[in-house]
Amino acid sequence: MTGQPDARMPLYLYGVGTQEEKGLHRPGGFPVYQLFLARDGGGQFNISGRGTIVMGTGQLFALEPGIAHEYIAHTRTGGELGFIGIGGESANSVLRATGIMCGKPCTLTGFDLIWSQMTELWKVLDQGGVSMWQMSTLIYQLILEIAQAIAPAGSVSSERQGNTGQLSVRTGSPARESSGSGSHVHGNSEAGLEGLNRAIVLMQAHYQDDLLFKHIAEAVGYSVQHLNRLFHQHYGVTGHQYMQRWRLQKGLDWLNEHPEASVKEAAENVGMEVNYFIRMFKREFGETPGKGIKLRNQLRLEQNLHPRHK
C-alpha cells in the first residue's frame, strides 16, 4: 500500500506492506529508501555492483534509492517479507545517523514488536484520517525503535566505519570542525554517542517545528547541561548553536532553490522569526539573505541578457 508523498515532509511514507516469500526484480531500483524485514524465512539480494547479500529470519536490510536489485526467497512456504518505503529530504541523514544504513542485514531484538509496528502503519494508512505531518512523526518513531533494536549489535561501535559511521551534517559551521562532508563522532561512551546521534536526528528531522533545545534533551533522556557538553566536545558548539546553524543552512538551501521567494518565506520555512533570521543569517554567512537574493537575481538577469555562445 502506498501513500501520497508530500515534498514538505522531512520524512514521508512512500509504501508499506508484506508479501509471502517470492521474488522481486527491480532493474531500475526503487525511488525511495527501502527497509526489508524477513519473517519466518529469508532470502538473498543480488545487488548491482555489490554482489549477493543474504538476509535471514528476524533480520532487516536497508537499501538506498535507485539501486538495481533482485530478491530470491530461500523458501516459498511460510515466510513473509515486509517492506517499508521512506522518502523525504531527511531520509538519508536520519537513516544513516541511526545506523540503519549499515550496508548489511541486521538482526533485530524484539523482531515481532517491530513487525507489529510496521503493520500498524499499514492499518493507519489504510484507515485514513491521519495527516501527513502525523504520519511523518509515526515513521520517525518507528525508525528510532528499529535503531534501538539493532543497538546491541553495535549500531554505534567499531563495526560502523567509513561512511556508515558518519553523521550526515551538511550545515556549514559544524562541518568546519571536521574534514569531508560528514562529521565523525568519537568517544568512549556508546550510550553517550547514541544519545548525541538521536539528538542530531531530531534536530535534522524537525528543524521546521517550534522545537527548543530543552525539548531535544528531554527526548533523548539527558539534561540540557550534559547534552550541551557532548555537543561542545564533538562539534565545538553548544546544542542550541548547532540547531540554529542547521536551520540557517536549510534556510540558505531553500533560498537557493526558490530564488523568487521572500526572506520572510524563508524564515517561516525554517521556523524562525524573520528579523532574528536576518540577524543570525548575516552573522553566520557574512551577508543578509536579502542581499544574497538580490545578487542571485542580478546574476540571473545578466545571464539572460548576455547568454554565452559556444
Image (spheres, grey):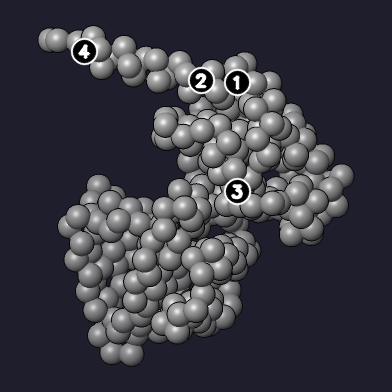
Relative placement, left or right, of 216 versus 70 is right
- Marks 2/3: CA–CA distance: 22 Å
Q: Nearer the viewer, mark 4 or mark 3?
A: 4
Under circle 3, the secondary element is loop
Q: Position of residue 155 (x, y in %)?
A: 58, 56
Q: Residues within 10 Å of mark 4 (few under 14, many from 20)?
A: few
CB contact under 8 Å: marks 1 and 2 = yes
Q: Which residue is mark 1?
A: 288
Q: Position of residue 128 (x, y in %)?
A: 45, 80
Under circle 2, the secondary element is helix
Relative placement, left or right, of 180 versus 74 is right
Q: Residues within 10 Å of mark 3 (few under 14, many from 20)?
A: many
Q: Which residue is mark 2?
A: 292
Q: Residue at x 42, y 31 (%)?
A: 260
Q: Residue at x 31, y 81 (%)?
A: 19
Answer whether residue 138 is visible to the viewer in this image.
yes
Q: Which residue is mark 4?
A: 307
Q: Which residue is mark 3?
A: 208
